[in-house]
Amino acid sequence: MTELFRLVRPRRVLEIGTSYGGTTQFIRETLNSLDLNDTIVRSYDVLERSWFDKQRNTGIDIRIENIFTHSYKELKQPTEIDEFIREDGVTVVLCDGGSKKNEFRLLSQFLKSEDIIMAHDYIDTRQNFEEDYYNKIWNWREIGDEDIQETCSRYNLVPFMQEEFNKAVWACRKKI
């Protein structure tokens, strides 16, 4: 993530799935270490946690809201997300909530050129997962190339730093 942020110098980060907030706090601290203190970090989760207030005090905008419809067919209020992503400068979108495949599909449509979208628990193929990851590196695969191929084609998303992010089981795509 540090190298990604150093390269793209995002103006905002949108995270779906705050959970325990470790990744969220790491993002804020990493951005600060790169003198990107003004980069907005907004994270959505469906459950309030007692430690979120402490994280909010570090400049993280944590919102308790499910931005997706129950069926994950669409966003509840697409204008709010669209406007946030489309502001000037690079946006990095992290899909790490309850339905990464749908989060990736729905949020990709709002990306502008040079924006980045990522999804956690990604391993390109089931075979690669079974042979090279399971019981060795990571035991969870929620999303693979078969889940994002159509979306990537539709919205001109290409792999970006994918070799590096494979080690951390993240898909990383850049809008061209």
Image (cartoon, rainbow, N blue to C red):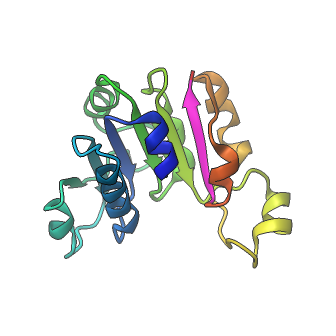
Q: Is residue 49 above or below residue 111?
A: below
- Residue under the image location 42 percent in, 39 percent down: 92
Q: Mark yes or no: residue 125 visible.
A: yes
Q: Main secondary structure of the magenta part?
A: strand
Q: Taking 46 as reference, is 138 left or right? A: right
Extreme residue in the bottom direction: 135
> Closest to the observer: 4 or 14?
4
Q: Quadrant of residue 174?
A: top right
Q: Taking 175 as reference, is 28 left or right? A: left
Q: Position of residue 66 (x, y in %)?
A: 31, 52
Instruction: Give the number of marks.
Output: 0
Q: Quadrant of residue 84?
A: top left
Q: Position of residue 64 (x, y in %)?
A: 23, 57
- Residue under the image location 24 percent in, 72 percent down: 49
> Closest to the observer: 102 or 114?
114
Q: Quadrant of the C terminus?
A: top right
Q: Position of residue 135 (x, y in %)?
A: 75, 79
Q: Position of residue 7 (x, y in %)?
A: 49, 37
Residue stretch in magenta:
169-175
Q: Is residue 172 magenta?
A: yes
Q: Is residue 79 above or below residue 55?
A: above
Q: Mark yes or no: residue 72 visible.
A: no
Q: Is residue 61 magenta?
A: no
Q: Quadrant of residue 23?
A: bottom left
